[in-house]
Amino acid sequence: MTAQPVASSMPVLRAEGVSKRFGGLLAVNNVDFAVNESEIVGLIGPNGAGKTTFFNCLTGMVVPTTGRITYRDTEIFGPASGLRKTLSGRDVQAHTPDQITKFGLARTFQNIRLFPNMTVLENVLVGRHCRTREGVLSAVGRGPRFHRTEREVRERAAELLQFVGLRRDEDELARSLPYGDQRRLEIARALATDPGLLLLDEPTAGMNPSETRATMDLVKKIRDLGLAVIVIEHDMKFIFNLCDRVAVLVQGAKLIEGTPAEVQADPRVVEAYLGTTAGDEGSS
Amino acid sequence: MTSAFLRIFDRYREQILRRTGPRGRVLLIAGVVLCLISSVLPWGVSGVGYTNPLGGNLQSVGIGGPRLYVLLLTLVACVGLTSVDGRRRSSLAASLGNLIISVYILRGLVHEGGGTGAVGVGAWVALVGSLVLFLGADTLPVTPRNVLPRLSAVADIALIFVVIGVGLAALVVGLDIEDDKQFVAFAIFVVALVVAANGLGVAAAFTSAFDRYRYIGYAVAAAAAFAFPFTQHGNAQWMAVFARVGVFAAAAIGLNVVVGLAGLLDLGYIAFFGIGGYVSALLSNAVFTTVHVHLPFLLVIPLGAAVAAFFGVLVGAPTLRLRGDYLAIVTLGFGEIFRIVAINWTGLTKGPNGIAGIPDLKLPGGFDFGKPHTVFGQLLPFQSNYYFLDIFLIAGVMVFFARVNDSRIGRAWVAIREDELAARAMGINTVALKLLAFGIGATLAGTAGTINVHIGEAIEPNAYQFIFSALLLSAVVLGGMGTVAGPILGAALLYAIPEKLRFVQDYRLFLFGLALILLMRFRPEGLIVSRRRQREFHEGGSGADAMSQPGQVAPV
């Protein structure tokens, strides 16, 4: 990375004018968004506001219709990387989700998507996949390099399990973990890819208050490691206590972005969640 | 009203569910006594037109054939009188084995003797006795499987020797039985014995002993495999069958990479086996070849593998981008395309006549696979040469499978099988890895295929019908997906049993379908279980359950 005089002048992630259209539905509408180094940014909005679709755009799970997304110096999506035509004439993104993960974006899922029949440790080991290169020949040959890499990978995975507090469950099957632990394992698995930016999709959904508090501490610890974090969440207390900055999405478009205090004070946010007080004005 | 009923149900639930009590003991003892008596009584009636009914002489007093099986299974069923864990499972299996054997023999006697007049008193006693025994065993409480104590290293190693030795002995004895009916009785006996031993924890103890002394275990297994030809006394019949079983087993392990690890359903796998076969047939200067080139076999093997791999990639590259069942349909189509091309491209393949007169293999050292050799004073038929070659092939494929499975690549495959989208999000290039699995499967099938045609000395398109893809798939599922040994066992059972029991061949598909349904109901993880699948099917999803297990203590 080139040394920048002011860190904040070079955001970790920058999305410019990102839109995604599904047929007649404009799920994400011209969203500008940026995340700086070591910053926790919240993404809130009513159900169906396009938060998860926006996440999917960032991580390459869906291809944006227009816009430009850059992670550090790499253009994930935009005119430079652009689209690639398949043989059938369909547009696909030049960068696939696995490449984007390799660039340094890692995510968790709204509905937990662990590898249920792999052990806790194996789940994290899979996360190391994109940072190692051992192929079939190396696996069959079992040379010293294979053993060294395998040892390093396991050490790193053990460290991460320690970090999220699942070290003693490493031999359990992922699916037999309690719900809250599954969320934490998903975070550990994402961290195993050595991301610079972590995207958490409703990390506290279904958690009790003490688990939510623990998750908040965990996210802060992750930020202290030097990672930038984007969080989608419906728990406002969680968002406003945790985030440095909050953006509100309503019907695909960004309504407002600011510090938690600014967002909380804005009457439009309440309106977006609860509707207008006087009459039923249909907004289009 | 309902609550009163529930209260009453609650009170009696224990007794209803467990059905314990003195009644069961009486039934068990009565059943054991009746069965033991029946095993020495004559089962047939002398003088009735029923000669040599089931190989042994059933008409006289004495023990032999099915009566020996009943005697041994009855002794095993006595475990129901003890308080060992797993006694219900074991004595149920043993008594059910007894019941099936006696019904089967009775039916045979009636059928061949022309009525119930041919049935001796022993058969009736055995029928009643095993029924009583079964009812008695059914009263036993449900317990977890027995866990045998781990005694010592010597005991572990001895167990490895005993289990593998008994397995080899059972195979040799079974193959020696000429009569179909007697073989069926023997097979029922073996299955009942295996299930009973499994209930008593023998299988689990063997698995853990094998895990501890893996190299000794593999050495013993290899020794047993090498010893097998010496048990055949120069008889070529079974060596020919098992030389075939060997190549199919190697191909099945390749399919296991595709199906068991990466979770891709390949229904045209036999085509890659056939491609390897045709490459080998064409380049070995067969009598009816259309390409007059004779390359040394050590060059033909990699060539056949490479051509199969090429077609694997060709089929896989466009289809593996799609998710779900498209691959199954495309591979199904590819398998048929291969066969139809082979039938119609007469200029190259000689069409339905196939290519005959494929010469036997010759190694550079002058070793001729087509000649019998005398080893340790025993004349081994030439098929043994291919059988030994198979062992080396399988050993190589097994090492390959085990090592790749336990590596970054193997973990990525399992991750893709578990959740493809999450795997992509974790930075796994799913298309490339699926293609890799598919290509490896095709390569291994091609390798096995090159050897296969030399055993049969001919190749023709109809040996590569869809049913053989289905059989290989069944071998993998039956034996145990994701395991090393499972496909070998599956291939051996599926290919050797129809050879042994000719009548099975007519009902082959029906019986395999039935076997697979029963398997899915009673043992969905397959006969041999990988640790992962064992947990997948038999571990509850509740966290509290998992927590209460003695967890591994972190060293830090």
Image (cartoon, coloured by chain):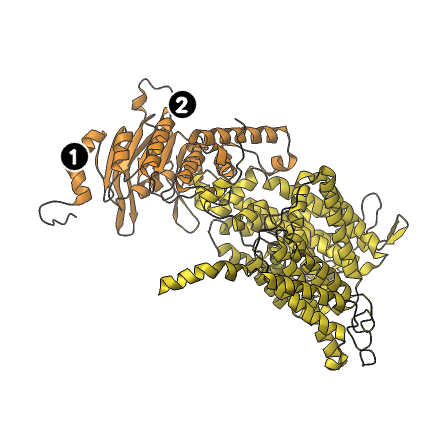
Q: Which amino acid does label 2 sit on?
A: Met
Please tell me the numbered disc located at residue B523. none
Which chain, by letter, is yellow? B
Rendered location of residue B491, percent (x, y): 67, 56
Q: Residue A207 is drawn in which quadrant?
A: top left
Q: Residue A234 is drawn in which quadrant?
A: top left
Tag 1: Cα neighbours inside 10 Å, few (<14), some, or many (≥20)?
few
Which residue was labeled with disc 2?
A1
Eye-nearest disc, 1 or 2: 1
C-alpha distance separating marks 1 and 2: 38 Å
Observer-nearest residue: B230 or A88?
B230
Dot 2: element: loop
Instruction: State the residue at coordinates (57%, 31%).
Output: A150
Q: In this view, does B355 lie above or below B54?
A: above
Rendered location of residue A93, percent (x, y): 39, 42
On the same chain, marks 1 and 2? The answer is: yes
Q: What residue type is labelled 1?
A: Asp
- Chain A, colour shown: orange
Rendered location of residue B32, percent (x, y): 70, 63
Instruction: State the residue at coordinates (55%, 61%).
Output: B19
Q: Mark 2 — on which chain does it sit?
A: A
Observer-nearest residue: A117 or B482?
A117
Residue at the farthest front position: B22
Dot 1: element: loop
Observer-nearest residue: B329 or A142?
A142
Residue B370 in view (yes/no)? no
Instruction: Specify whether B50 is left or right of A35.
Output: right
Instruction: Specify whether A14 is left or right of B391.
Output: left
